[in-house]
Image: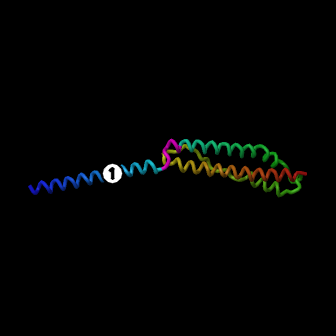
Amino acid sequence: MAGDGAKKKRTTIIIAAVVAVVLIVAAVVIGVTMFGGPDVATLKAECATVSDDLRVAQNEYNGLVNGDAATASAYTKDDVNDAKTLDALNKELSVETPALASCNVDADSEYQSAIDGIKRNTTWYQEHTKTLQAAVDAVTASLK
């Protein structure tokens, strides 16, 4: 009957090992769920929000480019006191706009990268709207 005790001990060790593995797997699943970052629905919603912010920033920039900046760039050096203002305006108008960034991704794991790209583009449009407006204002202030 000494073999029965060894068998029970071995069975107990196996059961304890299985329980330990199950607990570790459960802890990992809970940890990933709680601390693994936002879920796909949250990322899609954030991407839609930042895309809308980008659209607004692009519209403001394009409105300025096609409106006041176009008017100001039509002036000649004879129309202004300081020709450097026209040069600065033309330099601002010649900058290349950022490449398209959108929420069209191939995999859910790409949403964060798309969001970051959209935010960078939004910042670019906001900053260049300010500098372009300053250049337009300088030309307007320099009119004869």
Comparing 18 with 53, the one in front is 18
Q: Quadrant of residue 71?
A: top right
Return the x and y of residue 44 as percentages of the image width and height. Answer: 53, 42
Dot 1 amino acid type: Leu
In the image, 115: left or right of 17?
A: right
Q: Is residue 41 above or below residue 113?
A: above
Return the x and y of residue 118 as percentages of the image width and height. Answer: 60, 48
Residue under the image location 35 percent in, 51 percent down: 25
Residue identifier under label 1: 23
Comparing 57 with 22, the one in front is 22
Return the x and y of residue 99 as percentages of the image width and height. Answer: 62, 49
**Which quadrant is home to the N terminus?**
bottom left
In magenta segment, residue 40: yes
Q: Residue furthest right?
A: 144
Comparing 49 with 89, the one in front is 49
Q: Residue furthest left?
A: 1
Comparing 108 with 69, the one in front is 108
Residue under the image location 54 percent in, 50 percent down: 113
- Residue extent of the magenta highlight: 37-43
In magenta segment, residue 130: no
Return the x and y of residue 6 as percentages of the image width and height. Answer: 15, 57
Residue under the image location 85 percent in, 56 percent down: 83
Q: How is the image coloured?
A: rainbow
In the image, 74: left or right of 120?
A: right
Identify the element where label 1 is drawn.
helix
| Numbered marks: total | 1
Residue under the image location 91 percent in, 51 percent down: 144
> Dot 1 surroundings within 10 Å: few (below 14), some, or many (20 or more)?
few
